[in-house]
Amino acid sequence: MDVPLWIWGLTVAAIIAMIAFDFIGHVRTPHAPTLRESATWSAIYVGIAVVFGLLVLVFAGPQYGGEYFAGFITEKSLSVDNLFVFVLIMASFAVPRELQQKVLLFGIAFALALRTVFIFAGAAAIENFSWIFYLFGGFLIYTAWAQAKSGGHDDDEEFKENGFLRLTRRLLPTTEDYHSDRLTTKVGGKRFITPLFIALIAIGSADILFAVDSIPAIFGLTQETYLVFTANAFALLGLRQLFFLLDGLLDKLVYLAYGLAVILGFIGVKLVIHALHENELPFINGGEHVTAIPEIPTWLSLLVIVVTLAVTTWASLRKNKRDAAAGRPSPTEAGDAGAGREGRQVAAPQLHDDLPTGGRADAPPTGRTAAVRATDGGRNGEERA
């Protein structure tokens, strides 16, 4: 697939424009989006992704169109799974609902930039080392096994800070409380970062782990760098709206982990088969290509992905319906019983002006501590960042 440079430039400019529009039109003024707003914009972003895929289908042919749609659906599904972690992060740092959009949008922008680097690095590795498909395939099969073994997400699960996040909090002085939507503030003439900044780092650094399985997965469906990039970009762009649309419903997808395990395992096998066809390793078949096993066509990949997700969703809804009929609490209701996430969280903090004195360089408050106060101004010589 030969993509002219001007098409690349136009695509990147359009994606940047959509992120900028999101920031100016929705995030610049902190607010908690309504269900209608989230549903409308989720539909718009999915519609844009579908229209783009139809353009690929028309101008590049059914092969590349099918690869794009398979990649987009897979990345979107993995993004939904990632929302579980975002929920944990929001609850752990007690991010006020009015500020969650800003954290998500900055995190998505960082994720897109990071994944772009990973995509081009992966494309270069594939171009020069055909054996990389063995590594990608083996890793996805292992990830699928681990995903199926875990069986999903535990309501009692807590967000565990990674090393980078711990280092950031150790080196940079952090205020105890939120200061409206500021990332930094001055207290007593000294510059501090706020818990909002820490939450943003948590979202961004978590995506490094997400990219480890999502990038190999999409390379298992298409090796076209342009399609890999656009499928990732369009899957991420609507993630902020999807977070609020599915808030409170995520835990009802009780079989999502198993569905994703099937998809990742299938793509892993597809990658291994492709690696055998491209084989150059001397200890496998004497360094010759192994073509006895036919490669899996794109249409079959797309069919497996769509059917798996449809069955997973149907089975999850059936289980929730049976649990409701039997009088058992739904996963969401069970989560409400404990200290939960934002949207199910006990007493989400509100924005107000009573700022406590001083700031300290210790851990930001978590969802398990008493209410964290978020402020938009106050005493002690604070200045907007």
Image (tube, rainbow, N blue to C red):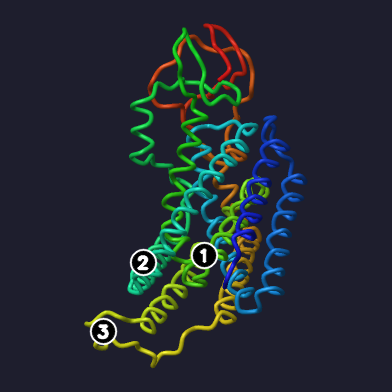
Question: Disc 3 designates what residue?
Answer: 284
Tell me whether circle 1 and circle 2 mark residues in contact (CB < 8 Å). Answer: no
Residue occupying image coordinates x 46% and y 16%: 191
Q: Foreground residue, 322 or 262?
A: 262
Whichever of labels 1 and 2 marks the residue nearer the N terminus, that label is 2
Question: Disc 2 designates what residue?
Answer: 139
Question: Disc 1 designates what residue?
Answer: 225
Residue 378 appears in which quarter of the rendering? top right
> Cα distance, mark 2 to mark 3?
19 Å
Callout 1 amino acid: Thr
Badge 3 crowding class, 10 Å Cα cut-off, few under 14, some 14 to 19, many 20 or more, is few
Judging from the image, what secondary structure is the residue with disc 3 in? loop
Residue occupying image coordinates x 41% and y 57%: 212
Callout 3 amino acid: Ile
Residue occupying image coordinates x 52% and y 37%: 91
Judging from the image, what secondary structure is the residue with disc 1 in? helix
